[in-house]
Amino acid sequence: MKIVTLILAVTVLALPAFAQEKKMAAKPAKGASVEAAVKGLEDGWEAAIMKHDTKPIDQVVASDFAGVGHDGKLLGKAGLLQEQVKSNHDTYTLATLNHVIVRAYGSNVAVAIGDAREKGTGKDGKAFDRTYRFTDTWVERNGKWECVAEQVAQVSGK
């Protein structure tokens, strides 16, 4: 009987906390627009890789960008554009983002973490199916979101 009473007491005491959590979940998060903006920029970046188009990436990557490529190389903006687009001779049939989580830290800083899956044929004619996990740090400067840092790791495929 003591156990039943204890369980009942804990449940009654916990109900207000659960009710508050539900109330907060129904209200849109303060940073929802930040999250949507950054998610859209991430999607555009991946689409640009598939099309071998440097312009969209150039527009969202900060001039003072610092990154670590999937092979461990340190990259500035020019190196990133070279690696992801200019020297990339793969033909893509798929380039999508999955499991992207964007966290806003104030109104002008956000971190995006997710997976980029890319399928296609390499310049050697061999098919590939690769997944990269990335962490991108975004800062809004003068009304424009820019990626200031990135780290990428290949988690599957060749």
Image: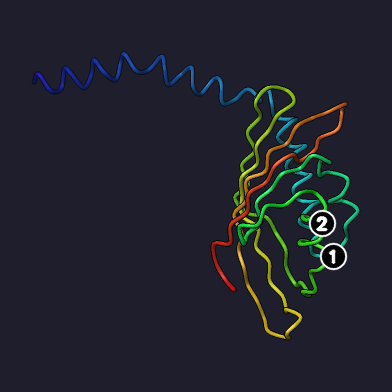
Label 1: how many Cα within 10 Å (few below 14, some 14–19, many 20+)? some
Q: Earlier in the sequence, mark 2 or mark 1?
A: 2
Tag 2: Cα neighbours inside 10 Å, few (<14), some, or many (≥20)? Answer: many
In front here: 125 or 70? 70
Q: Are marks 2 and 1 in contact (CB under 8 Å)?
A: yes
Secondary structure under tag 2 reads: helix
Q: Which mark is residue 122?
A: none
Indicate the quadrant where residue 90 lies.
bottom right
**Label 1 element class:** helix
Tell me if 42 is positioned left or right of 5 in this view: right
Model colouring: rainbow
Disc 2 residue type (three-letter): Leu
- Which quadrant would residue 2 be assigned to in this image? top left
Which residue shows up at 67% across the image and 46% down it?
150
Q: Which residue is mark 1?
A: 86
Label 1 amino acid?
A: Lys
Residue 117 vertical position relative to residue 114 in the rendered view, above or below: below
**x, y percent for residue 16:** 41, 14
Image coordinates of residue 23 in percent, x first then y, are 54, 20
Given residues 21 and 76, the one toward you in this image is 76
Answer with left or right where residue 16 lies relative to residue 30: left
Residue with the mark numbered 2: 81
Q: In the rendered view, does 8 fall on the left or right side of 39?
A: left
Question: Which residue, as the protein is rendered here, is positioned at the far bottom?
Answer: 125
Quarter of the figure with the C terminus: bottom right
